[in-house]
C-alpha cells in the first residue's frame, strides 16, 4: 500500500483528492437544493417536511450523508496542506505583482473559509438542533391516516426572520458562486479530463452551475424573510 | 528615452537585498537586455558593481533570460526578456525589475537565480532511451499530424521558469507537464511513459515547488504560449501510472 500513500501525498495526488471531494460536494449541492426548493411551496410546509422525513430515514441517504462529512473534512484538510506548501514555495514575495489570472482562482482559500464559517453556523442552526433538541411535532393527513413529522418547516421559517442570518446566507452563497466558478472546471483539469470536444461544454456547464445553484439556495432565505 | 529603474540588488545568497533606483537614457529600439547593458557600462565606468542578470542566446530560444518586469515575468509582452523592446515602455516610465521568486530557485546574485532544479527534473525522466549506432530513418514511424503538432507545441518550452515566477504557488507544473507531454504524445515516448510521469513528478515535489491551483497565470505569461492542457495530460499520466505501474522484477542470475 506504500504506492497508494506515495501517490496520494504527492502534489498531484493531493490535488486529485481536492478535485474528487469537490466534485462530490457539487453533486451533494444539487440534491440538497432540490429538497430545499420545497420550502418555496405555499403548502404550509407539507412538501418540505415529507422530504426531510424521507432524507432522515432512508439508509442510502444516511450513508451518503456520512460520506459527505468525510469529503468535507478531506477537502478542508487537504486544502490546508496544499496552502501551507504553496506559501512555503515562495518565502520571499515580489515587491510588485501585476496579476493575469482571475480573482477567484487566486482566492479559493478565502472563499472556502467563508463557506466553512457558513457551514458551521448552518449545521449548528439546523442539523444540530434537529439531532439534539426537540422540534415541534407536526402532523398532516395523507390517505386518511395521520402522519407525524418533525416540523422543520416552522423552525426554518422562524430562523429566517433574522435579517443578519439571511444576510450571512446570501453573502456565503456569493462566495460559493465564486468558489465554483473556478473550482468546477479546475477539478476536471485536475483529474485529467481535457479534450477539445468536451472541455468547452464543461466550462460552460461550470459557469451555469456556479450561478444557478448558489442563486437557488440564496432565494430561499430571502423569500421566507420577505414572506414574514 | 529616459527611464527610472528600480532594480533588486543583492550581493549574494545570504545577504539581504533591496530595490535600488537608477536612471538611464536609451534608444527605444534597444532590447531590454541592451538597456541593462547601457546601465552596466555606466556603472562599470563609475567603478560600481554592475547588475548581474542571466542571458545567453538573446534570440528567444535558450531560456536563460529571466527578469520579473513590472509585476510580470518577461514584462508586458508575450515574449522572452531578450526579445522585449524598449518601445513598449513610455518615456519617463518607472520600471521595477526583480528576480524570479521561488524557494526552488535560490537567488545567487542580484537578478540571477539557480534553476538547476529544472535540470534535475529532466534528468529524472525527461528523455527517451535510444540505441546508439546509425541514425534511424526519418519518418520510419508514422505519427498523425495532429499528434505531432501537439507534441511540437509542448516541446516549444525553453525551460526559462516564467511559469514558476508567475504562479502564485511557485508551481512548476506547466514546465513539468510540457516535458512529460511532448514525449507522451509520441510513439518513441511510450516505453518509458509511466516511469517518466512518476519520476518527474516525484523530483518536482522533492525540489519544493508549490502545487497547481489552475489559475492559468503560467500559460498566459509563458513566452512560448505552452497550454494548460499539458497539465491535464500530465495528471492523467500520473494517475494512470500510479494505479497501474508495476514494480521492477528482480531478474535471477540463472543456474
Ligand atoms: C459545498 C462546499 C464546497 C464545494 C462544492 C467545493 C468545491 C471545490 C472544487 C470543485 C474545487 C476545485 C478542485 C480542483 O481545483 O481540483 C475546490 C477547490 C478548493 N476548495 Fe472547495 N469546495 C467547497 C468547500 C470548501 C471549503 C469549506 C474550503 C475551505 C475551508 C474549501 C477550500 C478550497 C480550496 C483552498 C481549493 C483550492 C485547492 C486547490 O486547487 O489546490 N472549499 N473546491
Ligand atoms: S537570452 Fe536566450 S531566450 Fe533570452
Image: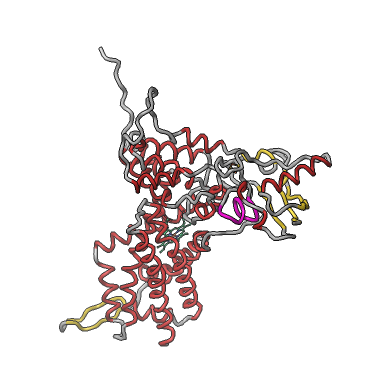
Percent coordinates x, y for residue A148 in the rendering: 25, 78
* Ligand 2 quarter of the rendering: top right
Q: Which residues are magenta?
A: B68-78
Q: Residue at x 56, y 48 (%)?
A: B162
Q: How is the image coloured?
A: secondary structure
| Residue B61 in the image, given as x and y percentages of width and height | 55, 42
Would you say residue B131 sits in the magenta stretch?
no
**Quadrant for the C terminus of chain B in the image:** top left
Q: Nearer the viewer, residue A135 or B177?
A: B177
Looking at the image, the residue that sits furthest to the top is B255
Residue A121, placed above or below residue A21: below
Tell me which corner region of the image, top left, top right, bottom left or bottom right, holds residue B185: top left
Asked whether residue A214 is in view, the answer is yes
Viewer-closest of B103 and B137: B137
Residue A203, x across and y down, in percent: 39, 63
Q: Quadrant of residue B16?
A: top right
Task: Work out whether residue A103 or residue B35 is closer to the camera in this orientation and state it.
Answer: B35
Q: Quadrant of the N terminus of chain B?
A: bottom right
Of residue B48 and residue A204, the one placed in the foreground of this image is: B48
Horizontal side of A190 relative to B225 (left or right) equals left
In the image, taking residue B184 as reference, residue B112 lies left or right, namely right
Q: Residue at x 29, y 85 (%)?
A: A43
Position of A150 with respect to A93 (left or right) is left
Residue A114, x across and y down, in percent: 50, 65
Q: Looking at the image, which residue sits at the far right?
A: B46
Figure check: A217 above or below A228: above
Amino acid at each position: 500500500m506504500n504506492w497508494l500513500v506515495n501517490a496520494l501525498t504527492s502534489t498531484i495526488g493531493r490535488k486529485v483528492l481536492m478535485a474528487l471531494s469537490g466534485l462530490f460536494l457539487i453533486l451533494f449541492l444539487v440534491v440538497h437544493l432540490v429538497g430545499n426548493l420545497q420550502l418555496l411551496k405555499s403548502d404550509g410546509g407539507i412538501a418540505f417536511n415529507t422530504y426531510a422525513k424521507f432524507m432522515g430515514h432512508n439508509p442510502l441517504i444516511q450513508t451518503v450523508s456520512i460520506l459527505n462529512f468525510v469529503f468535507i473534512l478531506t477537502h478542508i484538510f487537504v486544502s490546508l496542506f496544499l496552502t501551507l506548501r504553496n506559501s512555503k514555495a515562495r518565502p520571499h514575495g515580489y515587491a510588485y505583482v501585476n496579476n493575469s489570472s482571475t480573482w477567484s482562482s487566486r482566492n479559493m482559500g478565502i472563499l472556502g473559509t467563508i463557506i466553512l464559517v457558513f457551514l458551521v453556523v448552518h449545521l449548528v442552526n439546523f442539523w444540530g438542533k434537529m439531532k439534539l433538541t426537540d422540534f415541534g411535532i407536526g402532523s398532516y393527513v395523507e390517505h386518511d391516516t395521520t402522519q407525524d413529522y418533525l416540523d422543520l418547516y416552522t423552525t426554518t421559517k422562524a430562523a429566517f426572520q433574522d435579517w443578519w442570518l439571511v444576510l450571512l446566507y446570501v453573502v456565503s452563497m456569493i462566495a460559493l458562486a465564486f468558489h465554483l466558478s473556478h473550482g468546477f472546471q479546475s477539478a476536471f483539469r485536475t483529474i485529467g479530463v481535457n479534450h477539445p470536444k468536451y472541455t468547452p461544454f464543461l466550462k460552460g456547464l461550470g459557469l451555469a452551475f456556479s450561478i444557478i445553484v448558489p442563486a437557488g439556495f440564496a432565494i430561499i432565505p430571502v423569500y421566507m424573510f420577505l414572506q414574514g | 528615452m529616459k527611464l527610472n529603474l528600480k532594480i533588486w540588488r543583492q550581493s549574494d545568497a545570504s545577504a539581504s537585498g533591496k530595490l535600488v533606483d537608477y536612471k538611464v537614457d536609451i534608444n527605444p529600439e534597444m532590447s531590454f537586455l541592451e538597456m541593462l547593458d547601457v546601465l552596466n557600462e555606466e556603472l562599470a565606468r563609475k567603478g560600481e558593481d554592475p547588475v548581474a542578470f542571466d542571458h545567453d542566446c538573446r534570440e528567444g530560444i535558450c531560456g536563460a533570460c529571466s527578469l520579473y518586469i513590472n509585476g510580470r515575468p518577461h514584462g508586458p509582452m508575450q515574449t522572452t526578456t531578450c526579445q522585449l523592446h524598449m518601445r513598449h515602455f513610455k518615456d519617463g516610465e518607472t520600471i521595477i525589475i526583480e528576480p524570479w521568486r521561488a524557494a526552488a530557485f535560490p537567488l545567487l546574485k542580484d537578478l540571477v537565480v539557480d534553476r538547476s532544479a529544472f535540470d534535475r527534473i529532466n534528468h529524472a525522466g525527461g528523455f527517451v532511451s535510444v540505441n546508439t549506432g546509425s541514425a534511424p530513418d526519418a519518418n520510419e514511424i508514422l505519427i498523425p499530424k495532429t499528434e505531432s503538432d501537439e507534441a511540437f507545441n509542448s516541446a516549444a518550452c525553453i525551460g526559462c521558469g516564467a511559469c514558476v515566477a508567475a504562479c502564485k504557488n511557485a508551481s512548476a507544473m506547466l514546465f513539468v507537464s510540457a516535458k512529460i507531454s511532448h514525449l507522451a504524445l509520441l510513439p518513441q515516448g511510450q516505453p518509458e511513459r509511466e516511469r517518466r510521469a512518476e519520476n518527474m513528478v516525484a523530483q518536482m515535489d522533492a525540489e519544493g515547488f508549490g502545487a497547481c491551483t489552475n489559475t492559468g497565470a503560467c500559460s498566459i505569461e509563458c513566452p512560448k504560449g505552452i497550454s494548460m492542457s499539458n497539465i491535464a495530460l500530465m495528471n492523467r499520466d500520473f494517475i494512470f501510472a500510479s494505479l497501474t505501474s508495476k514494480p521492477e522484477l528482480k531478474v535471477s542470475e540463472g543456474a
